[in-house]
Amino acid sequence: MTIEATLGASSSRDPGTASTKGSAGSSWLLCGGCNTMIYGRRFDRAARVCADCGWHAPLTADGRLEQLLDPGSRRDIDVLAIDGDPLGFVDSRPYPDRLRAARAATGLHDAALAVHGTIEGNPVVVVVMDFRFLGGSLGAAVGEVFTRGAEVALRERTPLITVTASGGARMQEGAIALMQMAKTSQALGQLDEAGILTVSIITDPTFGGVAASFATLADVIIAEPGARLGFAGRRVIEQTIRQVLPADFQTAEFLRTHGVVDIISPRRDLRPTLGRLLSVSSRRDDGIPRQPLRAGGAILTKIADLPERDSWESVRTARRLGRPSTLDYIDMILEDFTELRGDRMSADCPALVAGLGRLDGVPVAVIGTQKGHTADELRHRNFGMPTPSGYRKSARVMRLAAKLGLPVITLIDTAGAYPGMEAEEQAQAVAIAENLRLMASLAVPVVAVVTGEGGSGGALALAFADRVLMCENAVYSVISAEGCASILWKDPAAAPRAAAALRVNSRELLRLGIVDGVIPEPDGGADADPAAAASALRAALRICLAELTPLDQMTLVTRRRTRFRQFGVPTAAANATDSDSDTSTPSDAAGEHAAATDDQPGHEQSPHEQTVEAHR
Ligand SMILES: [Zn+2]
């Protein structure tokens, strides 16, 4: 996509026209958003953001680095100066003349810079583009600057941050420019393989070849408010489809709704936002000290420790609106949480939240279904029932956790996956199935906690874990009691009987070995004292992570697969354990128990208590 095609007549907010009259700094200029006159010095002090309308004016590469990096931390990275005119290209002027003019006007060699620096003390490599230089177009020189920056980040194991502003590939370099998309994408792929965090900051505009390569391949995509990103430009699309596009088309806000952008960050918040993200990048070698995880707190693993309860009462308790939600727990137990949004495909599901943060200083990924406490919140969160894009967001964040070596914690409170027409059109079943397969081989510790309702496949899609826990008053079931009642009893009013028959409460599921342990709740339930409930959750997570984090990837994955392999095969498992004295793995313990409960109904030990109990 060319600069002309993407930007020509595309918007009243043409980023190229925010020029000042007179010398920089002391002059007056016209806001590109609201057309009011702004005094230059004041504008500069406000990071070149209009105080009236919030318009984010374009920045030069140097200006951006000055705002982003800790003062005095910038060290430029040497890049081979590419000065070619591979096609001998001439339009109204020879290409070399255009390059000379752009260099004279900007003081830059080309449209990008690569530097070392720090952001809130975290070492980073930053590649930043400058739209003034031939519309930030991607040619061989920009491709080389980016790739060199990525290679330095790889060699030094330093997170890579890119700031993009580009109309697309540089026409004057023909297919050589096109190849820069491949070259830069493969450089990011190598950073993925090496587990190095990459962050893309989208500024207005980011189009064509840059949008379809390094701008959107990063782990986390942050956009400035109003920034536009797309492959094809608005004018080209309007001409093709013969429709007028909505005003917010391709803006940061539009893209967040459609699952492309994680975070919209006003310029003044960029540094703290990046600081939080960088602090959870597990590969960092300095900065915030990490406390070692301590075993402690309590997980109930003895069935005798749990009172007999009416299953229907458990269902009703688990559904109480006052129970802490996933975001409540995140707020109470995590530090520096950054929510990540979107499936990078079509949407951002509000019923599923995911992100990175720290638990007792240890970086973790947290994924959970989100209900709400009020009718409005419930509606906004789709009643905690994820769409396929929710499960795809979850998968994206799990892959990121695996890349960065972060343990995954899932918090589950859902009646189930959303049953809707669009959900089926977007392949809900496939999204769930793919999550199960992904979790089966995720090479980092996974701890799942059913905090409220664990509804069917929509819950299991987050609960294929090394340790599966339940809050004391939670329920976990193959189908809702009402659903089971209407199918098998032909009477929804038979839900209490269905709940009892399905054995949905924590005591029953501990007995069945579906969960490894139960997290005690405060008197009156989690909603009676959310802080105490959160504290119990934190204690339980500490126990599990202390146990799991020392294990190597092969051991983790093998044990997790064995844990789920044995469900429903008591005889085979019993035979295996008969001849195998090693009962140290959860799966073996579960197998032994499965046989024991068949023969000895009075047995009062949970399947996994040997392993979990050791840490009580
Ligand atoms: Zn304005």
Image (cartoon, helix red, strand yellow):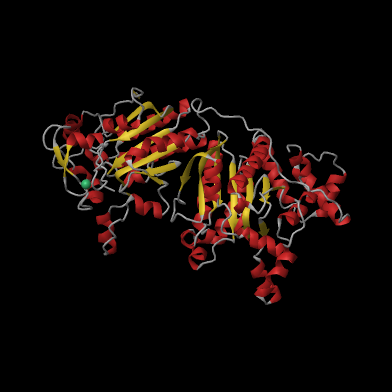
Q: Is residue 398 visible?
A: no
Q: Residue at x 41, y 32 (%)?
A: 150
Counting from the top left corner in percent of width and height, residue 395 is at 54, 49
Counting from the top left corner in percent of width and height, residue 130 is at 26, 36
Asked whether 564 or 607 is in front, the reply is 607
Q: Quadrant of residue 269?
A: top left
Going by the picture, which residue comes out furthest to the left?
Answer: 22
Q: Residue at x 85, y 51 (%)?
A: 603
Asked whether 84 or 308 is in front, the reply is 308
Q: Up-down: is 248 above or below 487?
A: above
Counting from the top left corner in percent of width and height, residue 8 is at 21, 51
Q: Up-down: is 165 above or below 25?
A: below
Indicate left or right for 491 with 64 as reference: right
Indicate left or right for 463 with 600 as reference: left
Indicate left or right for 528 with 232 as reference: right
Q: Quadrant of residue 447?
A: top right
Going by the picture, which residue comes out furthest to the bottom?
Answer: 490
The quadrant of the picture occupied by the C terminus is: top right
Q: Up-down: is 284 above or below 602?
A: above
Q: Residue at x 33, y 42 (%)?
A: 266
Asked whether 445 or 56 is in front, the reply is 56
Label total for image: 0
Indicate left or right for 375 with 148 as reference: right
